Amino acid sequence: MGNDPVPPLAAEDHVCAGCGVDYAALDLAEAERLIAEVPGRLRDRLGGVEESRYRRRPRPDTWSAVEYLCHLRDLYATSTIRLHRVRTEDRPVFEPMLNDLRARRFRYNERDPDTVLDELAANVAGFREEMAKVSGDGWDRTGSRRADETRTARWIVRQAAHEGVHHARDIDAVLS
């Protein structure tokens, strides 16, 4: 990877050691169910948490709960656009999210969690609407972000489900 600021994406058959999500075993209906649960689960988790706890970074290299929440909001917006482009374009090239840059420049840790939760719910709804437009062979259409990686529409959904599961665990950890 060297000085490449864009790390590789997880593989189509990725199994996450941290949360156990197995992309190849995750069917699209289950992935959609997991995605649909994200806003409510995080709203429940952050309800009643005092501001100092949801803005606290346990280590300089670990995001706060509200930073993870903002990341998920942006991830579902980005994933919606990527899925739309894979569905409507021939092998599109995706812009990287540049997660840490976003967190710094857009001041994630200063955001209001209730507002971000509302935006997250809207972005998840939009992602699920885009999912509903894909069918049959459309799930095998591809796009890429780096020259050495090609990902399917199916992968975009599995990745979005994984991010919700994984970062909910991260939020639980930073609030503990």
Image (cartoon, rainbow, N blue to C red):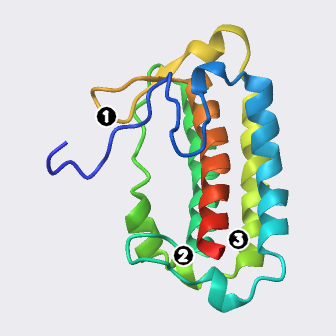
Quadrant holding the C terminus = bottom right
Between the residue at mark 1 and the residue at mark 2, the CA separation in whole angstroms equals 26 Å
Say what secondary structure mark 2 lies in. Answer: helix
User: Disc 2 designates what residue?
Assistant: 108
Residue 66: percent from left, percent from top: 62, 74
Is there any visible trace of residue 118 in the rendered image? no
Number of other residues with Cα within 10 Å of mark 2, as a class: few under 14, some 14 to 19, many 20 or more? many
Residue occupying the point 62% across, 35% down: 21
User: Which residue, given by chain and number where applicable, does mark 1 sit on?
Assistant: 146
Height in image: 40 above or below 152? below
* Horizontal and vertical percent position of residue 147: 27, 28
Q: Is residue 17 above or below residue 148?
A: below
Residue drawn at 54 percent across, 16 percent down: 141
Which mark is on residue 116?
3
Q: Going from the N terminus, do you reach mark 1 or mark 2 first?
A: 2
- Tell me the tag on residue 113: none
Q: Determine the residue located farthest toward the top in the rendered image.
A: 137
Residue at the (70%, 71%) spot, across then down: 116
Q: CA distance from mark 3 to mark 1?
A: 29 Å
Q: Name the amino acid, label 3.
A: Val
